[in-house]
Amino acid sequence: MTRIELPEALRQLTGGAPEITVEATNVAEALEQLGRLHPEACVRILTRGGRVRPHVNLFVREHDIRSLDGLDTTLEDGDSLLVVPSVAGG
Amino acid sequence: MVLDKRLAELRDRIQQLNPAEAQQRLTAGELLIDVRDPGELVGGTPEGAEALSRGELEMRIGDLAAPHAPVMLICASGPRSLLAADDLLRLGYRRVAVVAGGVDRWQREGLPCVRPEHIDADSAERYARQMNLPEFGIEGQARLADARVLLVGAGGLGSPAALYLAAAGIGTLGLVDDDRVERSNLHRQVLHRDDRIGWPKTDSARATLEGLNPKIEVRTHQARLDARNVEDIFSGYRIIVDGSDNFATRYLVNDACIKLGLPNVYGAVQRFEGQVSVFAGHGRPCYRCLFSEPPEPDMAPSCNEAGVLGVVPGVIGLLQALEVIKLASGVGEPLIGRLLLFDARTTRLRELALGPDKGCRYCAAGGEFPGYGDYGEFCNASGGRDLESHD
């Protein structure tokens, strides 16, 4: 089981849920399942072409997936996938 | 009474030197340690003495002397050096002596003292509590006095950062903002006040900061930061604090910091969440390594739409101030290569590891600076907000 932890900005697209639990062995699978459950939230993370949007970062085990294996980064049972979008407020 | 008895007992068994004798031994190469707290040294310390406060003495004496070496101790007037000498004897130091009458008598007898630079009597009192931190001390305070820090934005992030940086004694504190104070700012922009609604934020900030600490120089730039003036404004500073409220300014600040080689202390907030990091160049990640492009217009709410709980920029702005103090003083470990996330709902802080993007157009090694972009285009990207304001 993997928890996808969502930022405030995306929670309104998941009915307020701060995290979504999915069964997945890697990041791409986790996001695919998020897309089935909450397509509007997923569209804010991935482009139509399936790439991570440039204003979004994904972290597994506190590391940016770009420094791991990108969308192929393996998820162990109990891992969380943290979504961090850019925010500009001051 | 208990203390008097103990001091009398220590005087019986610990060698006491008069200041002139101690100075002769010091000149001959013996070690003299001033065991007062760092904040007490501003009035002067015996020339040639090492400063090591009593609280640190046992931990660090090994760096200065072996147990068989002679060690002389001095404090303000005598009692503390006796107690410290007893600590050293217990630690195994056998040749410990104290200077009778302490620095007070040393100075009365006209023996040579040195005063730390930069610290006058007002500063000695004003900053005593942080100078007494052994890791910080007079040297740390002097480095803050030398620091030149620019806050981009005198708003939700810039307010708490400016207040604490001014109070801490940052020597030159600049603010750039072209906005005026509005009532809707006041729940988080604590530099400003209700009776200053309509004032330029830079004027309000100056009034508050100079009232808090008249010892520092406050510089204000009532201007819209843009690609034409950014280098001119940044060039007078050594540390930049990004407290802006829009993507256009954030990318401009990043790019100018890379070009000028300045560290960028980043903070951003939205609703109940905040982010903090330090983008310091030299092969470490920059803002564009983290977020290569701003969100498209329909992907992110504007600041006004999103809203923010007032204390959230308070927390994040203070963390930015902390990072500035660490960078300026050289004390501690700045948030370089790390992103800190704050969630006010759960009061949770998370630290994430950041790496440089080897393909970053702006900071990758060997690349030429690609020039400033058309930051105005980001205007629409954050929901039509007036991107040149920094509230």
Image: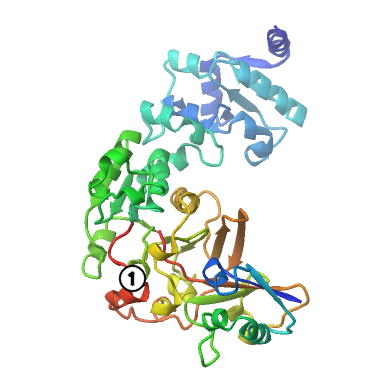
Is B362 left, or right, of B72 in this rendering? left
Q: Position of residue A65 (x, y in %)?
A: 61, 79
Identify the residue position indicated by label 1 in the image.
B248
The answer to whether B374 is drawn above or below residue B203 in the figure is: below
Residue at 34% x, 66% y: name it.
B253
The answer to whether A12 is drawn above or below residue B344 in the figure is: below
Count residues near mark 1 (Cα–Cα under 10 Å), then give few for <14, some for 14-19, many for 20+.
Answer: many
Q: How is the rendered protein coloured?
A: rainbow
Q: Position of residue B287 (x, y in %)?
A: 44, 70
At label 1, the amino acid type is Ala
Please tell me whether mark 1 sits on a helix, a strand or a loop: helix
Residue at 43% x, 70% y: name it.
B301
Residue at 32% x, 76% y: name it.
B380
Of residues B235 and B200, the one drawn nearer to the viewer in this rendering: B200
Q: Position of residue B46 (x, y in %)?
A: 48, 26
Q: Chain of mark 1?
A: B
The answer to whether B144 is drawn above or below residue A57 in the figure is: above
Position of the C terminus of chain B, as image quadrant, is bottom left
Position of the N terminus of chain B, as image quadrant, is top right
